[in-house]
Image: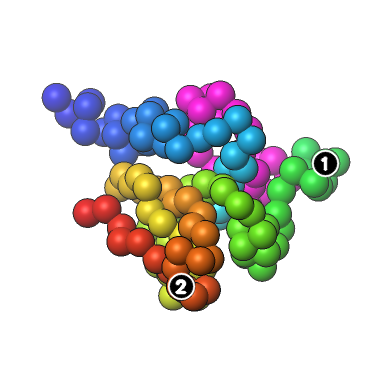
Amino acid sequence: MGHDSLARASSAYHLAQEIKPYLKADTPCYSVSTYEQTLPFYLKRTVTLVAFADEMAYGLAQEPQLWLRDYAEFERAWRNSNYALAIMTPQTYVEFRKTGLPMQEIARDTRRVVVKTIAQEQSGHAGVAGTPKS
């Protein structure tokens, strides 16, 4: 039915189901330049906003430790993390691939890409390793 195809594109439910096997209790989860309202609900955890404040601006001003202001802060946190996940738009994913941020795609839908960190020694260099899912 039409609803089923729209649900995959608009709701984060299906994407959350694909992400759950990759989550550990202490896994940082970043939402880069976007905020999917339903994702924290379906994952049963908070996400750290990156370069995005919008309607959360007031709260983030009160608790600035709950977000990363720009891509540079995110890249530092990402590179220093043993294991983390991030959700972003396909365009943002392409931008980070071009910069060589080490990441591996683990899930995708029409509006979002989810990546995980990869160990520097696995990639053989500071560039991107792994091949995205088709």
Query: Does the magenta run of residues contain 44?
Result: yes
> Which disc number belongs to residue 63?
1
Residue 19 percent coordinates (x, y) = 42, 36
The structure residue drawn at horizontal position 56% and vertical position 54%, both measured from the top left corner, is 33
Query: 52 and 77: which one is in front?
Result: 77
Query: 38 and 129: which one is in front?
Result: 129
Q: Can residue 113 be seen at all in this image of the molecule?
A: no
Residue 111 percent coordinates (x, y) = 36, 48
Quadrant for the N terminus in the image: top left
Query: 86 and 23: which one is in front?
Result: 23
Left or right of 56 on screen, residue 37: left
Which amino acid type is shown beneath numbered disc 1?
Glu
Which amino acid type is shown beneath numbered disc 2?
Gly
Q: Are marks 2 and 1 in contact (CB under 8 Å)?
A: no
132 lies above or below 39: below
Callout in the foreground (2, 1): 2
> Which disc number belongs to residue 124?
2
Neighbours of disc 1 within 10 Å: few (<14), some (14-19), many (20+)? few
First to last magenta residue range: 35-57
Query: Does the magenta run of residues contain 80?
Result: no
The structure residue drawn at horizontal position 51% and vertical position 66%, both measured from the top left corner, is 121
Residue 102 percent coordinates (x, y) = 49, 65
Query: 17 and 33: which one is in front?
Result: 17
The structure residue drawn at horizontal position 57% and vertical position 48%, both measured from the top left corner, is 83
The structure residue drawn at horizontal position 55% and vertical position 33%, both measured from the top left corner, is 24
Q: How many marks?
A: 2
Q: Residue furthest right?
A: 62
Measure how far apart labels 2 and 1 are at the Cα level.
38 Å
Quadrant for the C terminus in the image: bottom left
Left or right of 63 on screen, residue 69: left
> Which disc number belongs to residue 79?
none
Q: Can residue 36 be seen at all in this image of the molecule?
A: yes
